[in-house]
Amino acid sequence: MKPLDPRLLRHARAARRWIALSVGLGALTAGLVIAQALLLARVLSAAVAGTATVRDVRTPLIALAAVLLARVAVTWLNERWAHRAAGAVIAELRARVVDHATALGPRWLAGGAGAPLTTLVTRGLDALEPYFVRYLPQLVLAATVTPAVLAVVLGLDWVAAVTIAVTLPLVPIFMVLVGRLTQDASHRRLATMERLGGQMLDLVAGLPTLRALGRERGPIARVRELGESHRTATMTTLRLAFLSGMVLELITTLSVALVAVGIGLRLVAGDLDLQTGLAVLVLAPEVYLPLRQVGAHFHASTDGIAAAERAFDVLEVPLPPRGLRDAPDLRRATIRLDGVSVAAPGRGVSAPAGLTLELRPGRVVALAGPSGAGKSTTAQLVLGLLPPDAGTVTIQLPGHAPVDLAEIAPESWWDQVSWVPQRPVILPGTLAANVAAGVDRVRLDAAAALTGLDQVIAGLSEGWETHVGHGGVGLSVGQRQRLALTRALVADTALVVLDEPSAHLDAQSEQRVLDAVESIRAGGRTVLVVAHRRTLLSLADEIVLVHAEAHAEEPS
């Protein structure tokens, strides 16, 4: 990433405002630095020479105090606004990355991008804060204060200005050399963190299975190995940061010493007056300071820079084309899948392959077939989450021409669809809020009675107001499934897609699911259900067998 990547300004509007504000504050800081040096030189030269009284230097002293207070105020404002800008930019980038990844669809996430994306939008982008709070303000100061102060030094003493101009390029040269090493280490650290995050997500998701098989301690060595790799990469970055900081300090100290020696020799020879010499001595460190701080804070921001580059990579993945037409009324429309095939990534098969089915209003269609045949993929096709590689998905109203699902605006389609996946999405909050916010309790209780959620509610001291954690923490797997099914009932959408709704339920609870499906059909709603159990298949008006088949490999 460049010191100021144009993509950051393009993808985060908050960054534009902060850059403009930083430039203004930088220009103000340059003026205050110059005023402070000139006033301080005037006061000190008069004090050393003994040619002025306190009354003579009272005005410069008052002005110097005002300048110092102004510098403190500017520094405070810079720090405060930098933290605000960092929070706004991180939140904006995080939202854009999540929205973009969602628009790319589940197939893109399932292709190995899911776990790294989770790490990126949580801990990864948080590392951008040092970039905005420390590095970027110093970069702006280097572009404003350094040339302004150097120009003033040139007007005061051209010899000192030449000395500074010769030694000044050494700072960015060494900064770039060490910075490249640090940037590579930061990329390795982020990659290690993403691998560790993916490993931990997989481990947590599969922990019940591992415990059931008595293998919960198996991944310990792998997690320890990844953690050690992350620690090593982090320590490497810190070591390089300390070493480069020492190099930059040494260079700037020697450069200021050269300027001081030249001024001292010319003061002794009488070729330079004391006030000018003092002014140049005060200004010389201010020329190097912004560049030195850029180098020092660059290493604290490299993790954030690496994360921003990953975010830009995600945001620049082209989105699939989105339809613009409003969805027709699905209570009257027929959904058709004609010869639909979807290539399963990494398997060399199409799943489903050549599938044809028809979803007519008010009917229950069940998808059956072996595991891996593409039943859940078919559900994603109907939901509009996945485009087919072959064939078409169309919607047709009576007396109208069929419309391809790809031409329909996704939001207008999803407004008429309810989806109950195998792992329902449950957000932190009350049970009532997770089922349907703003719906009266009579309707909630009626839907809960059909799905069996009423028994769960009755056993909780706070009833519908009971809080659950992210993903349904506090509820069993079966209870989460009942909650999701109740949500589908209350939504009263035209199309309901159920993916193995009875997979985690016993026989008694399964009957509740059957009753719920019957209720949905009786309400004139269309149901597409992925099913294995015969009881659920027997309820369907039509059973469609889904199969997979190998597809020809593309020539290399």
Image (spheres, rainbow, N blue to C red):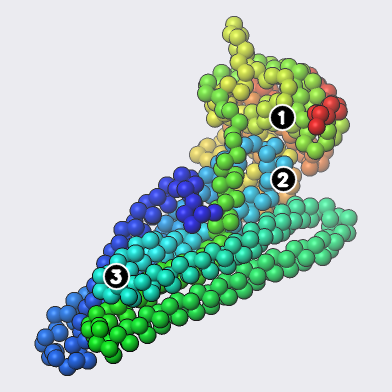
Tell me residue 198's x, y (percent): 71, 54
Name the outermost residue toward the bottom.
Answer: 50
> Could you say which is closer to the camera, residue 413 or residue 187?
187
- The Cα–Cα distance between marks 2 and 1, rounded to whole angstroms, is 21 Å
Q: Which residue is drawn at 61% across and 53% down?
A: 120
**Secondary structure of the residue carrying numbered label 2:** helix
Upstream in sequence: badge 2 or badge 1: 2
Tell me residue 197's x, y (percent): 69, 57
As drawn, 410 above or below 225: above
- The Cα–Cα distance between marks 2 and 3, rounded to whole angstroms, is 58 Å
Residue placed under numbered mark 1 in the picture: 379
As drawn, 308 above or below 286: above
Q: What residue type is labelled 1?
A: Ala
Q: Which residue is drawn at 21% across and 86% down?
A: 45
Q: Which amino acid does label 2 sit on?
A: Gly
Q: Which amino acid does label 3 sit on?
A: Leu
Label placed on residue 112: 2
> Could you say which is closer to the camera, residue 81 or residue 45?
45
> Could you say which is closer to the camera, residue 413 or residue 44?
44
Tell me residue 86's x, y (percent): 45, 58
Count of labels shown? 3
Label 1 environment density (alpha carbons within 10 Å; few <14, some 14–19, many ≥20): many
Residue placed under numbered mark 3 in the picture: 154
Q: Residue at x 70, y 60 (%)?
A: 192
Label 3 environment density (alpha carbons within 10 Å; few <14, some 14–19, many ≥20): some
In the rendered image, which quarter is residue 291 located in?
Answer: bottom left
Tell me residue 79's x, y (percent): 39, 66
Q: Which quadrant is the N terminus positioned in?
A: bottom right
In the rendered image, which quarter is residue 76 located in?
Answer: bottom left
